[in-house]
Image: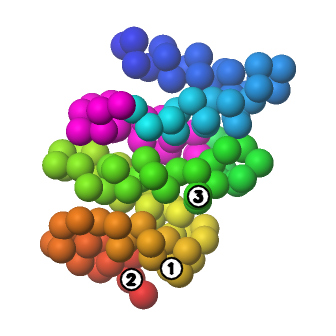
């Protein structure tokens, strides 16, 4: 419940230009945690990034550019947790649709597991 309430407050802040709007919220959310191996933290951030992208899109102006979200997505794609990898893959698919295969290729190449990389390439297609 706390996670849902926190997300609601952050979404309200993202809608409020006087509070800095989406760029400020995105910047705080995309800040890499000190311990990237804690999958729950990465999953929560990826879930919120996905929600923020649903509402505000993926643009450099709102802090959700391909370049901005790539580090967090890469960590998620390399997570040992299946839910975290799945959410990162969902965001990667969205970025693939928005920016094309060539732009997301570095993210795909950043997947450490050969099996996960192949599975992701099959999902995204050429």
What residue does disc 2 label?
Answer: 125
Residue at image position (38%, 56%) is: 74
* Scheme by which the image is coloured: rainbow
Residues at discs 1 and 2 in contact (Cβ within 8 Å): yes
* Mark 2 or mark 3: whose residue is earlier in sequence: 3
**38 relative to 100 in the view: left or right:** left
Using the image as rendered, state which of residue 112 and residue 46 is in the foreground: 112
Discs 1/3, front: 3
Earlier residue among tags 1 and 2? 1
Q: Label 1: few (<14), some or many (≥20) within 10 Å?
A: some
Could you tell me which residue is drawn at 77 percent across and 26 percent down? 20
123 shown above or below 11: below
Which image quadrant: the C terminus?
bottom left
Residue 94, position in %: x, y?
Answer: 51, 61
Q: Residues within 10 Å of mark 3 (few under 14, many from 20)?
A: few
| Position of residue 57 in the picture relative to residue 79 (left or right) | right
Residue at the spot 45% in from the left edge and 76% down from the top edge: 105
Q: Element under label 1?
A: helix
- Secondary structure beneath dot 3 equals helix
Majority SS type along the magenta span: helix
Q: Tell me residue 84's x, y (percent).
A: 28, 45
| Image: magenta residue range | 34-54
Dot 1 or dot 3, earlier in sequence = 3
For residue 39, say whether it is visible.
no
Q: Residue 92 at x, y = what percent? A: 44, 61
In this view, 84 is above or below 27 = below
Residue at 39% from the left image edge and 12% from the top image edge: 2
Mark 3 highlights which residue? 67
Q: Is residue 43 magenta?
A: yes
Residue 82 position (above or below residue 27): below
Q: Which residue was labeled with disc 1?
A: 101
Crowd around label 2: few <14 · some 14–19 · many ≥20 (10 Å): few
């Amino acid at each position: 419940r706390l996670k849902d309430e926190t997300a609601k407050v952050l979404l309200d802040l993202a809608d409020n230009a006087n509070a800095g709007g989406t760029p400020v919220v995105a910047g705080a959310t995309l800040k890499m945690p000190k311990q990237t191996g804690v999958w729950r933290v990465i999953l929560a951030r990826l879930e919120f990034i996905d929600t923020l992208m649903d509402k505000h899109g993926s643009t450099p102006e709102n802090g959700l550019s391909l370049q901005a979200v790539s580090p967090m997505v890469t960590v998620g794609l390399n997570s040992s947790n299946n839910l975290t990898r799945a959410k990162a893959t969902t965001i990667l698919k969205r970025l693939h649709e928005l920016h094309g295969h060539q732009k997301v290729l570095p993210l795909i190449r950043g997947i450490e597991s050969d099996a996960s990389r192949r599975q992701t390439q099959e999902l995204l297609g050429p």
